[in-house]
Amino acid sequence: MRRKTAGVHSTPCFGGLVSQHYMQSVLGLVQLASAAGFDATLALLGHDSLITRSRNTLVSQFLMTQGATHLLFIDADISFEPEQVLHMLNFNQDFVAGVYPLKVIDWSNPAILRAAARREGFETAPLLYVGAASTGSDREQRGPFCTAIYCGGGFMLIKRQVVEQMIAAYPETRYKGAHAYSNAVNSEANYALFDCLIDRDTGAYVSEDFAFCQRWRDIGGKIWLDTEGKLTYVGSYNFRGDPRLRYQGTPALAPGFERADPLTA
């Protein structure tokens, strides 16, 4: 009899906060889980400003959750379609991640060319994405999924055996406690699998999610990217005006503003 899928959906909450769009997505996921026949448990960790420690703590909580088969990291500023999680679960690989954009609008030449060639619209052409697909002979493709060098930690689905294999491979990462206050349940066995590292080939300082991917790949693990799911990275934007360009010299071609009538808007 196949073991029932039971996911722990873990979110580091900087400042104890999550976004509205994230929460709406999570509520949709809980409803979908009930209808699709898998268990979904939500684990939130607030008031820890160190993202590496937050992820390591959430991994420990996952390991203490009896019956949990999958760990899904969803960052508090990511919104998603719940069906994407089911799509990734059904792919049934050890390590699968979604691809989401950085909080950057980059109208450099590649973006201009994408828009000019109409390969992408103006909304997505200037976006940069978190995640690097494998290239050359290392690349495998199965439908919308492809193998990757690394992925972001903001939408990462891993099976329990991934964590167990990494613990066995990196026993030196174990620690007993942390100098922090959080709402996490204490564990005697914590592992710093998400600690940052210095890349041994380039000397670059790499982030915690890249480091986790590197550790997994170093022991023969494979990472898959879901290139079909549409994720939104919720963030602020500075709307910096320069009205002289529109109002000085040549008369404005359009009204400066239109105030909506509250009774008809």
Image: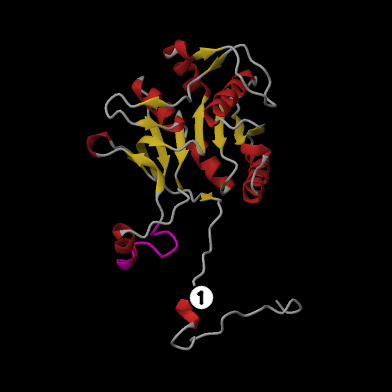
Q: Is residue 114 magenta?
A: no
Q: Give the left or right position of residue 170, taking residue 39 as reference.
A: left
In the rendered image, residue 152, in percent from the top left (x then y), is placed at: 45, 38
Q: Tell which of 51 and 209 is nearer to you.
A: 51
Please state, as top left, top right, bottom left or bottom right, where the C terminus lies in the image.
bottom right
In the rendered image, residue 6, in percent from the top left (x then y), is placed at: 61, 29
Which residues make up the magenta segment? 116-126
User: Residue at (52%, 85%) from the top-left corner?
Assistant: 254
Q: Quadrant of residue 168 in the image?
A: top left
Q: How is the image coloured?
A: secondary structure
Check disc 1 and give the amino acid type.
Pro
Q: Is residue 121 magenta?
A: yes
Extreme-right residue of the structure: 263
Q: Quadrant of residue 259 in the image?
A: bottom right
Q: Tell which of 34 and 203 is nearer to you.
A: 203
In the rendered image, residue 41, in percent from the top left (x then y), is placed at: 66, 32
Provide the residue designation for mark 1. Answer: 243
Please state, as top left, top right, bottom left or bottom right, where the N terminus lies in the image.
top right
Q: Give the left or right position of residue 80, taking residue 210 as reference.
A: right
In the rendered image, residue 100, in percent from the top left (x then y), is placed at: 46, 47
